[in-house]
Image: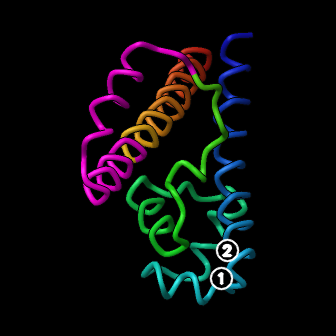
Amino acid sequence: MFLKFHYVFVMSIIEYVGDRIRALRAKEKLSQEALAQKVGTTANTISRWETAVYRPTLDDLEKLSRCLDVSILEFFPPEERSGDAEITALLRAAQQLPPEDIEELKKYAEYRKARNLQQQASKVKSSRRGKKQNESN
């Protein structure tokens, strides 16, 4: 049951990412070809990302976020906000920074968050593969 839940979670994340790429591309009125050219890939790859046949890397998502002028977190499902004391401390520290430093800090935090989400999905996928291998032996 646990494995089935995680498989659905991973697949839904990959499909969600693909749907977001498609939606954000459409919002900018870009063809797959035009977006591919901006990102430095092929239209076929864009199509496969959008249909969840291929999984974009974190670097791919970073390039897409810059080309589409959105946060990298726009490609992942929203999460509930927490009132964590560490987050509050981070916000207090950032208040005194100049705007360009705040923007850099925001991009860094978004990149790390996206990396963690991608690593979670990869762990679930690899544990599923190991379970399948054990069942076939």
> Between residues 107 and 44, which one lies in front from this camera angle?
107
Packing grade of label 2 (10 A; few <14, some 14-19, many >=20) is many
Residue 57 drawn at (x, y percent): 44, 55
Note whether 123 is above or below 25 in the view shown.
above
Q: How is the image coloured?
A: rainbow
Q: State yes or no: discs 2 and 1 in contact (Cβ < 8 Å).
A: yes
Label 2 vs 1, first from the N-terminus: 2
**Residue span colored magenta:** 82-110
Q: What residue is rendered at 62% in x and 63% in y?
A: 49
Task: State the SS at label 1.
Answer: helix
Note whether 103 is above or below 120 in the view shown.
below
User: Dividing the image into 4 quarters, which one contains the C terminus?
Assistant: top right
Kind of residue at badge 1? Gln
Task: State the SS at label 2.
Answer: helix
Task: Return the residue at label 1.
Answer: 32
Note whether 22 is above or below 43 in the view shown.
above
> Between residues 44 and 38, which one lies in front from this camera angle?
38
Q: Is residue 69 found left or right of 2 in the rendered image?
A: left
Kind of residue at badge 2? Arg
Residue 132 drawn at (x, y percent): 60, 23
Task: Return the residue at label 2.
Answer: 25
Residue 48 drawn at (x, y percent): 64, 67
Q: Quadrant of residue 36?
A: bottom right
Q: Quadrant of residue 89?
A: top left
Packing grade of label 1 (10 A; few <14, some 14-19, many >=20) is some
Is most of the magenta stretch helix, strand or loop? helix
Q: What residue is rendered at 50% in x and 68% in y?
A: 64
Q: What residue is rendered at 60% in x and 82% in y?
A: 43
Residue 41 drawn at (x, y percent): 47, 79
